[in-house]
């Protein structure tokens, strides 16, 4: 039967894998032409070809009466339960973004919390746009990193209720996950290092580099030191203290404009 689970498939979270999708949603998938035409009697190898043909993602549409091909393939993966290596290849596939998203959703449904964070968090650096088929049947745009963040923190995705998983800080507290370093810190440091060069390309004559800023600070220190050397006596005349007595260097650093070599 096309609608039955593989007899060799193992239970997921103590139940039939198909039960991870609500019955009313499964019935809509069973009545979808894509399911009847493409998802009958396929293997894991045939599933790879069908996943490569996806051009959008989404759940039910047209008043929640029909299901997208993305949702049909999600249910089919729950039925035939492909190998762990195939699922990881789906997630690591950088050429087919919808295949990657399909693998991420399947792993979120059947995976353990540790491996979910381990394999899905790297996808947060994937900023490509994907087409989303809305409930009205129209198409919009989303981003893979935003969708992966929803898989990690939201309770539902494409109309499917996701299994509950512990928060990341809980897994860190019990030693199952290492603390995660945000990519924003690296990007900020990289931007700060590249800012003078970017400014030089835009307006070279107005570039103030770190070397010039240091010269400006030295010049200001020398001006302050020179003012301290002026001692006004009681008669109103200025007297100059000796440099040796107050330990002030007499070397003068002139202000210079330093330009970046382009």
Image (cartoon, rainbow, N blue to C red):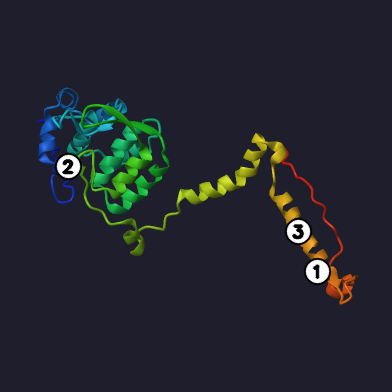
Residue 92 position in % (x across, y down): 38, 38
Report if the CB atoms under discs 2 and 1 are less than 8 Å apart: no
Give the camera-side residue of 81 and 183.
183
User: Secondary structure under badge 3?
Assistant: helix
Find residue 215 and report its image quarter.
bottom right
Q: Is residue 228 left or right of residue 83?
A: right
Q: Is residue 252 above or below residue 190?
A: below
Residue annotated with mark 1? 228
Find residue 98 and report its image quarter.
top left
Residue 191 position in % (x across, y down): 56, 45
Identify the residue at image location x=30%, y=56%: 167
Label 3 or label 2, whichever comes before in sequence order? 2
Residue at mark 2 to residue at mark 1: CA–CA distance: 86 Å
Question: Badge 1: how crowded within 10 Å, few (<14), some, or many (20+)?
Answer: few
Residue 81 position in % (x across, y down): 21, 39
Question: Badge 3: how crowded within 10 Å, few (<14), some, or many (20+)?
Answer: some
Q: Is residue 4 visible?
A: no
Q: Is residue 3 left or right of residue 184?
A: left
Residue at mark 3 to residue at mark 1: CA–CA distance: 13 Å
Q: Which label is found at residue 9?
A: 2
Identify the residue at image location x=35%, y=45%: 120
Label 2 or label 1, whichever comes before in sequence order? 2
Quarter of the picture containing the N terminus is top left
Report if the CB atoms under discs 3 and 2 are less than 8 Å apart: no
Camera-side mark, 2 or 1: 1
Residue annotated with mark 3? 220
Give the camera-side residue of 165 and 149.
149
Farthest front residue? Answer: 235
């Amino acid at each position: 039967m096309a609608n039955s689970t593989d007899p060799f498939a193992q239970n997921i979270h103590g139940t039939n894998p198909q039960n991870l999708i609500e019955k009313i949603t499964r019935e809509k998938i069973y009545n979808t032409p894509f399911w009847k035409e493409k998802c009958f009697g396929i293997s894991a190898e045939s599933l790879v070809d069908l996943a490569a043909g996806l051009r959008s993602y989404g759940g039910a549409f047209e008043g929640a009466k029909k299901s997208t091909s993305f949702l049909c393939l999600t249910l089919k993966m729950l039925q035939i339960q492909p190998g762990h290596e195939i699922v990881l290849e789906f997630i690591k596939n950088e050429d087919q973004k919808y295949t990657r998203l399909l693998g991420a959703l399947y792993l979120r449904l059947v995976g353990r919390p540790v491996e979910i964070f381990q394999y899905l968090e790297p996808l947060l650096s994937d900023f490509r746009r994907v087409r989303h088929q809305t409930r009205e049947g129209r198409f919009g745009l989303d981003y893979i990193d935003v969708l992966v963040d929803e898989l990690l923190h939201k309770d539902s995705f494409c109309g499917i209720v996701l299994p509950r998983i512990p928060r990341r800080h809980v897994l860190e507290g019990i030693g199952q996950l290492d603390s995660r370093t945000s990519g924003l810190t690296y990007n900020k440091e990289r931007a700060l290092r590249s800012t003078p060069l970017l400014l030089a390309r835009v307006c070279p004559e107005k570039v103030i580099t770190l070397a010039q800023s240091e010269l400006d600070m030295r010049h200001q220190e020398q001006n302050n030191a020179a003012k301290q050397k002026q001692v006004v006596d009681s008669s109103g005349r200025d007297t100059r203290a000796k440099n040796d007595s107050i330990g002030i260097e007499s070397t003068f650093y002139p202000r210079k404009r330093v330009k970046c070599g382009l």
